Image: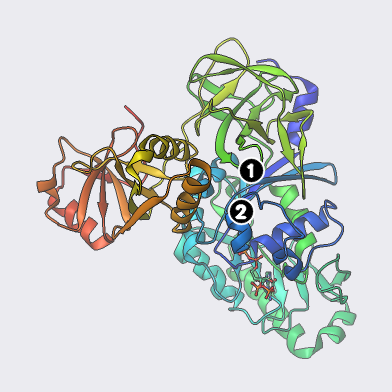
Amino acid sequence: MKISDEIQAEVQRRRTFAIISHPDAGKTTMTEKLLLYGGAIRLAGTVKARKAKQYAVSDWMDIEKQRGISVTSSALNFDYNGYRINILDTPGHQDFSEDTYRTLVAADSAVMLIDGAKGVEAQTKKLFHVCRMRGIPIFTFVNKLDRACKNPLDLMAEIEETLGIKSYPMNWPIGIDGDFKGVFDRGQSRIELFESGGSHGQSIVASRSGSVNDPRFKELLGDHLYGRLCEDISLLDIAGDEFDMEKIRAGELTPVFFGSAMTNFGVSQFLEAFISMAPPPAERIHSEGIMSPWDSDFSGFVFKIQANMDPAHRDRLAFIRICSGKYEKGMEVTHERTGRKIRLSQAQQFMAQERTAAENAYAGDIVGVFDPGTFLIGDTICTGQKPFRYEGIPMFPAEHFAEVSARDSSKRKQFLKGIQQISEEGAIQVFKTPNLGIEMFTVGVAGILQLEVLEYRMKSEYNVDLFIRNLPYTLARWVIADNFTKEMLGFSEAVIVEDQYGRTVVLVKNQWTLNSIAGKNKDARFLDIAPPVS
Ligand code: G4P
């Protein structure tokens, strides 16, 4: 392995992470505030301005402009205190898609954002499990403390019970009934009180801090809040889990922070602590061994393909997570799957409000390269003697299914082309169903909006009007069994299909049906992550 000091130093200062949360927990607000505190933007747009789209991080597709929500995920970078921060944005509304999962494969750590009044919600759970599977560190930010929240101790119990991870509060909120005043920093045994300022969270808030024993704070907080804080602190010290950096790094313990993204309370404290604790890019396993991020051989993999970044050019962009070495403009890499040499001349990077040409980038960074149809999700590109392949990106089951066909049968060619290209981007999973013929497919998506996106894109990009018939299934499982047949299902509301790679998949209406099928077929296995393609 060849290591250069330059690459090593650059990699060590990189922090690449994704924010996982349920819709409306405040991910957009938090991202914006991290950009604000990171100095990447001067004023955070108010939510109104954001909805009016003055703030345009990811509105590349018309459909999302119409709806005012994000259907794409993007990668933003900024420098802060000597660190290069890469935030991977994970789409999270009804537009929840496989991209959301895949993005997590490109991240080195995750920030789990929880609405303090709602606790752990469904989508957070799903994303958490993907992070857990990868063993990446997960940092928790309990948001919206400016409003009445659940009791923090109950929240921590909920995190442990529903997610199965232990938690360690790094700070403790002062005022949880809509009277949020500040936090107690446990590591430093200091109180930090925030001043609301009056800029509606647009600019950085002032704070004052000092020892918990400082009589000033008792006076400022009043007997009730101060007394409660003292009680909570002693309880935590006796009853809570121990701080253990190794467990945090292994994703077995989540450090918890309390704050409010909207009012900025606790955001800078979180950013500071996160940066000091989150890991830089680590080694990654590939088909020939293990790659160090410091290796001067360049390598990376495609985790996302985005069509229509610029509708005027109908371009397709492949997002590459760099895993080792340095990207230099114009460099030649091997595309492992085809063995072809490719010149990377126009890679792009993404700042707060724009994309710019990347001059160079290092392991941990995300670059977008123009894709004339060369890339598939999961492809590896690398330099060096022997090309290799990074471990595949797992395919997760879709949760919404529909039969699709072209309304006008003379558009068959465009229909097939569109379905193929959109499935290559990973936006939809395509299944072949016996007896359906080749003019009709079953498609599966992770979020219901993806079906609308499909319909819209087929019309605008391929000029095909789709006929879509929603199917009642909600679960898909890859089946490992000898010759699994329809008769073995025993349910009319279940169906056997074949995915793009010829693997058998069963689609069922609900968990109960799945359990019954599994009960009847004890020799078969039903996997919720696709097995390797044979
Ligand atoms: P998302 O990306 O996770 O879906 O959430 P987003 O940031 O869009 O926030 C969802 C809603 O929650 C927004 O309000 C936002 O202002 C609010 N929010 C975010 N952080 C906080 C916080 O710390 N405290 C409080 N009280 N609210 C917060 P909205 O009602 O959807 O929009 P608007 O009425 O504010 O325009």
Q: Is residue 230 above or below residue 166?
A: below
Q: Which mark is residue 23?
A: none
Residue tagged 1: 311
**For residue 316, what is the image quadrant?**
top right
Residue that protrudes farthest toward the top in the picture: 385
Please tell me how crowded label 1 is: few (under 14), some (14-19), or many (20+) other residues with Cα within 10 Å. some
Task: Say whether residue 334 is left or right of residue 366.
Answer: left
Specify whether tag 2 is near ligand 1 (CB below 8 Å).
no
Is residue 309 visible in the rendered structure shown here? yes
Q: Which mark is residue 62?
A: 2
Position of the N terminus, as image quadrant, is top right
Q: Nearer the viewer, residue 362 or 285?
A: 362
Question: Looking at the picture, which amino acid does disc 2 mark?
Answer: Asp
Q: Residue at x 61, y 38 (%)?
A: 314
Q: Is residue 240 above or below residue 4?
A: below
Please tell me how crowded label 2 is: few (under 14), some (14-19), or many (20+) other residues with Cα within 10 Å. some
Q: Residue at x 49, y 17 (%)?
A: 338
Q: Quadrant of ligand 1?
A: bottom right
Residue that protrudes farthest toward the bottom in the picture: 223
Position of the C terminus, as image quadrant, is top left
Q: Residue at x 84, y 42 (%)?
A: 82
Q: Is residue 198 above or below residue 224?
A: above
Q: Residue at x 57, y 56 (%)?
A: 63
Q: Nearer the viewer, residue 253 or 274?
A: 274
| Percent of width and height locating residue 123 | 49, 61
Q: Nearer the viewer, residue 200 or 229?
A: 200
Question: Looking at the picture, which amino acid does disc 1 mark?
Answer: Pro
Colouring chosen for the image of the structure: rainbow
Q: Secondary structure at mark 2?
A: helix
Q: Is residue 352 above or below residue 291?
A: below
| Percent of width and height locating residue 262 | 74, 70
Q: Are marks 1 and 2 in contact (CB under 8 Å)?
A: yes
